[in-house]
Image: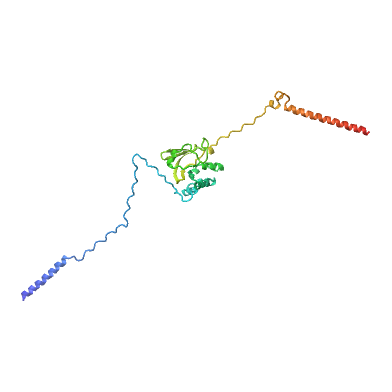
């Protein structure tokens, strides 16, 4: 009996030992699941900008001409263009007051005429001496504005093809009138009036009929701001004393002068008057004697 009991206790002990070893082999708690992976970006990063195409060696890149004001839809209006560009209020006012703006509007929208305009900035007008513009006549103000206008379309690349002096809407290009000279050096365009030298600025507007460029100086024409000296009128010729009196030899007929003729006619008139008076006295005396 004792042996059986000992054998039973041994079996029970082995069972408990086996369970304990199995429990120690397993972890107390299951490991936590891995953390959630970071969210992917909504949009992939934008690719790098494509580098500009390099020109072939030995060839200079052609200048690209950009305009400040985009091409207008509808009628071309210079006043609206310069107003959108800002900084040209004085030039706009002169365009309107002289009537040049209305003339350009009509020709740009009712014909195939093309124009190139050099628009001075407000700062350019401010740099003039006070009263420079107000001292001009209406005609001179019109000529001043027309001096800033070429009657054809000239792009930046075509200024080098112009022949000096360049004609403007103001008129004659001869010396002392309205000559305008244009020279180029690379992409730079220089303008000279004989009084003012300036450089062409940026392009304000460009289409197939109109080009407007900024200039930082007012183009002053010679004919207005350096007028030609006026020629004094020659004095009227005066008669000398000898010519006034004259002589018989100076007369074409070799007779008396005009003054002598006047004296002779006066003497004849006086003689006739005395004769008529004598006859009247005699008639009166005759009738008086008859009466007595």
Task: Please say whether residue 259 is visible from this viewpoint.
Answer: yes
> Which is more toward the observer, 185 or 24?
185
Q: Position of residue 185 (x, y in %)?
A: 42, 38
Number of numbered callouts drawn: 0
Instruction: Identify which residue, 161 or 92, lies in the foreground.
Output: 161
Q: Is residue 268 left or right of residue 127?
A: right
Q: Position of residue 96 (x, y in %)?
A: 53, 47
Q: Residue reaching furthest bottom?
A: 1
Direction from residue 215 to residue 24 in the image, left or right: left
**In this picture, residue 69 sits left or right of residue 9:** right
Name the spot of residue 95 as percent of width and height, x first: 52, 46
Residue for point 56% across, 42% down? 139
Image quarter of residue 246: top right
Q: Is residue 132 visible?
A: no
- In the rendered image, residue 41, in percent from the top left (x then y), is placed at 31, 57
Residue at horizontal 88 percent and vertical 32 percent from the top: 283
Protein image colouring: rainbow
Where does the N terminus fall, quadrant-wise? bottom left
Image quadrant in which the C terminus is located = top right
Determine whether, in the image, residue 271 is placed left or right of residue 192: right
Q: Residue at x 73, y 28 (%)?
A: 259
Q: Residue at x 9, y 72 (%)?
A: 11
Q: Is residue 13 above or below residue 106?
A: below
């Amino acid at each position: 009996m004792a042996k059986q009991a000992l054998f039973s206790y041994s079996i029970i002990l082995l069972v408990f030992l086996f369970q304990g070893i199995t429990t120690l082999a397993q972890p107390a708690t299951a490991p936590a699941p891995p953390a959630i992976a970071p969210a992917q970006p909504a949009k992939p990063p934008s690719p790098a900008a494509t580098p500009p195409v390099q020109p072939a060696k030995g060839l200079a890149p052609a200048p690209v001409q950009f305009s400040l004001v985009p091409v207008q839809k509808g009628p071309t209006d210079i006043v609206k263009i310069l107003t959108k560009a800002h900084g040209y209020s004085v030039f706009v006012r002169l365009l309107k007051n002289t009537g040049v703006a209305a003339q350009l509007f009509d020709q740009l929208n009712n014909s195939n005429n093309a124009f190139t305009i050099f628009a001075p900035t407000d700062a350019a007008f401010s740099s003039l001496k006070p009263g420079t513009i107000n001292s001009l006549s209406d005609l001179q103000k019109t000529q001043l504005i027309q001096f800033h206008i070429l009657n054809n379309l000239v792009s930046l690349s075509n200024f080098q093809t112009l022949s000096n002096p360049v004609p403007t809407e103001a008129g004659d290009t001869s010396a002392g009138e309205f000559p305008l000279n244009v020279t180029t050096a690379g992409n730079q365009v220089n303008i000279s009036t004989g009084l003012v030298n300036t450089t062409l600025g940026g392009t304000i507007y460009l289409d197939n009929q109109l080009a407007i460029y900024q200039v930082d100086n007012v183009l002053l024409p010679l004919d207005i701001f350096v007028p030609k000296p006026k020629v004094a009128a020659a004095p009227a010729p005066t008669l000398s004393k000898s010519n006034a009196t004259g002589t018989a030899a100076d007369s074409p007929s070799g007779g008396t002068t005009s003054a002598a003729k006047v004296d002779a006619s006066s003497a004849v008139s006086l003689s006739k008057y005395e004769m008529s008076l004598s006859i009247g006295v005699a008639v009166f005396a005759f009738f008086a004697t008859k009466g007595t």
